[in-house]
């Protein structure tokens, strides 16, 4: 866990660098273009994970050590085929948009985004396999390395070729972890003996878990897209991307801590310890991470009025309300992570898909009502409402995993962040 914490600390620093240095250099308008491209790659890659690290970490550690390489290889080949099938229609749709609306979707930007998406999908698959095989340290440092590479490449590309060069940084940022990830898994997979018959029901688990994760990521990133479509302003899109990017930096750091914990929990259940008996570990980590997330959110909203212009530039001084609303989602991150892990341990991905789908519906409805009049702030409000609904429905789906105290503390912490924002004038 020490390596995971160190990796997450560096990841958070790299994420903050991404949401600080890049918008300051690019400015609201060009950053809006870059952030939309980043959102497409991120949402696209994660929605194609088809179970992602949870699928690998749930089934590979469930067998003996001598069989894990073979299981990982079989799963890798299965997931690679699924992702190739998912990527095909997306790439075709991008080509059609370029031909049908070349002024709205420039060919060079579409090509760069498509290339970055393909590389990121492949890199994610490599690191998910590495995690299941016990490479937890490499997994923990993956995003710190990727985001640092992305910042350097995007700023360098912007200096050379403007916004197209910045978007080209996405290709570099996804290509470097791809090389690293496959270097990690090449030898153990090559040394694995024979094939392995995957357990029945694994396809259903993967599809339903992927659906839940896709709904979750669409809720997280969909607010940015809604602002781009409904606000009619690239500046408001830039504000939304910055605000939500700040909140998601902390959210993803919390989620990754739980992801690293999953293989150990699976091994515990394999040793005849039932899911209900290991969920106390989830709640313990949830309590600790909630304390950190709440402190970070309160510190953030308390200083928004001077940190935004000082750190990101005067052009972002109007993003305070959007950032405050987005930061109120941080205390909810442990609860959403626990729901995901509980669904995996109990092999009930359908319940998680139902709860995240409810959150997505809430986001869409709120965005349609709030974004046209309130721009980026409306997008952040939609994200917050969607997250609230997702957590509430998860509590019904997995009551024993979340626990009443942790659920109340998470929702109460979110409201407390809003009250602090009102008190300091950020809202």
Image: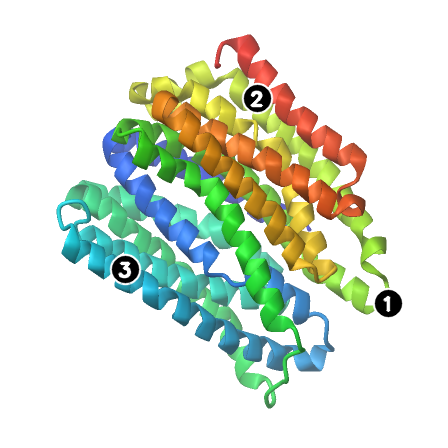
Q: CA distance from mark 2 to mark 3?
A: 43 Å
In the image, residue 2 above or below residue 381:
below
Return the mark for residue 237: none
Instruction: State the residue position of label 3.
Output: 93
Q: Secondary structure at mark 2?
A: helix
Q: In terms of image quadrants, where is residue 367?
A: top left
Task: For label 2, count other residues whose C-alpha is less than 10 Å away and answer few (under 14), some (14-19) or many (20+).
Answer: some
Residue at 49% in and 9% down: 425
Q: Position of residue 39 (x, y in %)?
A: 38, 45
Residue 8 seen from this side = no
Residue at 35% in and 26% down: 372
Q: Nearer the viewer, mark 1 or mark 3?
A: 3
Q: Earlier in the sequence, mark 2 or mark 3?
A: 3
Q: Position of residue 147 (x, y in %)?
A: 42, 47
Instruction: State the residue position of label 2.
Output: 299
Instruction: State the residue position of label 1.
Output: 272
Q: CA distance from mark 1 to mark 3?
A: 48 Å
Q: Secondary structure at mark 3?
A: helix
Residue at 54% in and 12% down: 422
Rendering colour mode: rainbow
Q: Secondary structure at mark 1?
A: loop
Q: Position of residue 107 (x, y in %)?
A: 16, 54
Q: Nearer the viewer, residue 272 or 207?
A: 207
Task: For label 1, count other residues whose C-alpha is less than 10 Å away and answer few (under 14), some (14-19) or many (20+).
Answer: few
Q: CA distance from mark 2 to mark 1?
A: 43 Å
Q: In terms of image quadrants, where is residue 53?
A: bottom right
Residue 187 seen from this side = yes
Mark 1 touching mark 3, by CB under 8 A?
A: no
In the image, residue 393 above or below residue 317:
below
Q: Nearer the viewer, residue 15 or 328?
A: 328
Figure disc tally: 3
């Amino acid at each position: 866990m020490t390596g995971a914490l160190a990796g997450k600390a560096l990841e958070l620093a790299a994420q903050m660098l991404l949401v600080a240095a890049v918008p300051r250099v690019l400015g609201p308008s060009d950053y809006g273009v870059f952030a939309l491209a980043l959102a497409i790659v991120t949402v696209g890659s994660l929605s194609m994970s088809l179970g992602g690290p949870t699928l690998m970490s749930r089934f590979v550690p469930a067998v003996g050590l001598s069989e894990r390489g073979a299981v990982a290889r079989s799963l890798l080949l299965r997931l690679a085929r699924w992702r190739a099938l998912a990527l095909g229609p997306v790439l075709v749709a991008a080509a059609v948009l370029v031909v049908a609306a070349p002024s709205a979707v420039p060919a060079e930007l579409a090509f760069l985004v498509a290339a970055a998406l393909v590389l990121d999908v492949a890199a994610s698959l490599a690191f998910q396999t590495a995690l299941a095989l016990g490479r937890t340290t490499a997994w923990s440092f993956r995003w710190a390395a990727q985001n640092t590479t992305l910042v350097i490449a995007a700023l360098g590309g912007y200096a050379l070729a403007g916004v197209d060069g910045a978007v080209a940084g996405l290709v570099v940022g996804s290509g470097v972890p791809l090389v690293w990830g496959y270097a990690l898994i090449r030898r153990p997979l090559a040394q694995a003996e024979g094939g392995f018959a995957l357990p029945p029901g694994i396809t259903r688990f993967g599809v339903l878990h992927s659906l839940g994760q896709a709904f979750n990521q669409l809720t997280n990133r969909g607010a940015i897209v809604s602002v781009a479509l409904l606000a009619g302003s690239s500046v408001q899109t830039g504000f939304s991307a910055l605000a939500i990017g700040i909140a998601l930096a902390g959210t993803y750091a919390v989620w990754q801590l739980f992801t690293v914990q999953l293989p150990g929990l699976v091994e515990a259940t394999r040793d005849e310890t039932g899911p209900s008996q290991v969920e106390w570990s989830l709640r313990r980590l949830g309590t600790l991470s909630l304390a950190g997330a709440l402190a970070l959110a309160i510190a953030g909203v308390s200083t928004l009025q001077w940190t935004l212009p000082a750190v990101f530039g005067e052009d972002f001084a109007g993003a305070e309300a959007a950032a405050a609303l987005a930061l109120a989602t941080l205390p909810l991150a442990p609860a959403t992570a626990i729901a995901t892990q509980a669904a995996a341990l109990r092999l009930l991905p359908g319940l998680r898909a139902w709860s995240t789908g409810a959150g997505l519906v809430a986001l869409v409805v709120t965005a349609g009502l709030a974004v046209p009049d309130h721009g980026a702030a409306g997008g952040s409000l939609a994200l917050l409402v969607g997250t609230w609904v997702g957590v509430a429905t998860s509590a019904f789906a997995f009551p024993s995993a979340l626990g009443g105290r942790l659920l109340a503390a998470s929702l109460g912490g979110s409201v407390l962040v809003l009250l602090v924002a009102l008190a300091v004038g950020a809202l």
